[in-house]
Image: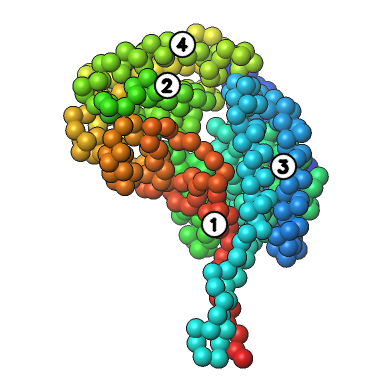
Amino acid sequence: MLDNYSGGRYVAAKTERSIRLFDPCTGSVSDSLPASGAQDVATVCDAAAGAAPAWGRTTPAERSRLLYEVAGLLESHSAELADLEVRDTGKPRAQMTDDEMPAIVDVVTYYAGACRLLEGVAAGEYLEGITSSIRREPVGVCAQVTPWNYPLMMAVWKWAPAVAAGNTVVLKPSELTARSTLRMAELAGEVLPAGVLNIVLGDAETGELLVGDGRVSMVSLTGSPRAGRAVARAAAERLARVHLELGGNAPVCVFADCDLGAAVDAVVGAGYYNGGQDCTAAARVLVEASVEAEFLDLLLERVASVVTGDPWEEATTYGPLISEAHLRRVSGYLDRLGADATVAAGGRRVDRPGYYFEPTVVTGLDQHDEIVQEEVFGPVVTVQGFGSEEEALAMANGVEQGLTASVWTSDVARAGRFCRDLEFGAVSVNTHAPMASEMPHGGFGSSGYGKDLAVYGLLDYTRVKHVAQGW
C-alpha cells in the first residue's frame, strides 16, 4: 500500500477505502493505494497551509537555488524515475529516458531561472501626491490534479511554476499512476522545506475533497472536459482560481503543395506516440482531395512498421493502453462507426495479456461522426478529404476542442492565414506540436483556459497587487 507524502514525510492514510493498481502490460494487480478521505486531505492541506507563509516570503534567489538542486536530483535519479513510470504506464522505456526525463529536468531548470525575473509593470506617479507600484505575490496553497498519460511530466508542469512563484502545493496524481510522482516528491523533499510539495493519493472523491478545502486558493487540473467542468463548479462555490488543461482533438491540415512524406512522418510520430494517449496527438488528418489517395498509401505503409508491444524492448513504438476501461473506451469508437467508414488499418485489441491495441487508421468519415468530434485518446488516426482552403479551415475548427493544430503547405500566405484563423492555442507550420519550456501550452474552447510552461505558466500562479503610497 502506498502512502501520502505530507510535510516532508510519508504518512499512512486513515481511510479504509483502497484502490488496486494494475500492470497495463499484463493486467495483473501490482500494488494498491488509499482513496484518501476527508481526514487525510485535511492533514495534507494542513502541511501545505503551514508552510505557505514562510515559503511565500523566501527570496526569488533562494527559491531558484533550491529548484536548481531539485533539478539536479531528478536528473541523477532519471533511470529510477523512468523505471517507475514504465511500470505504471507501460510506455516504452526509451521514450522515458530519451524524451521525457530530459524534458522534465528542463522544466524544473527553466522555472529555477524564471522565478528571478518576476517583476511589476511600472512604478510612478499617476495621481498627484501618490506613488503607485505593482507587486506580484503567490496565491497561497495550490491544489493540483494530474493525469495518467504523463505522470511526471504533467506533475512538473504543475508544481514547478507554482513553487517557483512562492506557493505551496498539494498534488493529487491519477490513481492509476502514482508511484513515480511520489518518488519525485520525496526527492524534491530532500531540498525543499517540509510542506512545500505534498502528494495526496486517491480517486475522484478525493479530488472533490481537495478542491473543496477552504485553504486552497487555486486549483489546476489537467484532465477531461467532464472533470474540468466539475472542478470549475466546485471551485466557483468559494471563488477559488481555476487553471484547466482539458485535452485536444488536433487537426493536421495537409495541402497538396507540402512535402507529403514529411507530413506522413509527423502524423505517424505524433499520432501513435504514447499510444495516442496525448492531448496533442495528430488525431484528425485533413488532406487536400487531389493527394488524399497518395497520402493514405504513404500513411498505411508507415503504419505497418509501427510496433505495439513490450515497453522494455527497443523496437516498441508504443506499449499498452493504460487500463482495461480505457481500452474498451477506445475500441468503442471503432464499434460504433457508421456504414460509410472504413478501418483501413488496425482497429482491434491485440491478442495477448495486457491492454494492447493495434495502430489504427479510419477513413470515409463525416465531420459530424463521433470519432471525429470527440478525442479518442488512443492509437487511432482519422483521415478526411477536403476540396478547398475554406473547407479545410471549417473542418479543422469544427470541433469543441481548441488545443493544438498544424498546417502543412509551402504557400507562405496560406500558412499565415491558417495561423491567424485556426482557433487553437498553439498552431504549427510544417511540423506538429513541438514543445519547449519557454513556450506556452494551453487551449481554447473545451480545451480549457490558463497556460502551462513559459513565463505565462509562472504568472498564472501569482496575484497582482496595486500599492499606492502617499507622500
The relative height of residue 377 versus residue 195 in the rendered view (above or below) is: above
Q: Which residue is mark 1?
A: 460
* Contact check, label 1 and label 2, Cβ < 8 Å: no
Dot 1 lies on which element?
A: loop
Is 404 left, or right, of 78 in this rendering? left
Q: Earlier in the sequence, mark 1 or mark 2?
A: 2
Q: How many marks?
A: 4
How far is the residue under mark 1 from the one under mark 4? 42 Å
Mark pair 4, 3: CA separation: 36 Å
Q: Give the camera-side residue of 355 and 180.
A: 180
Q: Secondary structure at mark 3?
A: helix
- What residue does disc 3 label? 71
Q: Amino acid at mark 3?
A: Ala
Classify residue 113 as left or right of residue 451: right
Query: N-terminal of the two: label 1 or label 4?
Result: 4
Q: Which residue is mark 4?
A: 305
In the depicted structure, whether residue 65 falls above or below residue 83: below
The three-letter amino acid code for the residue at tag 2 is Asp
Where residue 334 sits: x, y (%)? 35, 20
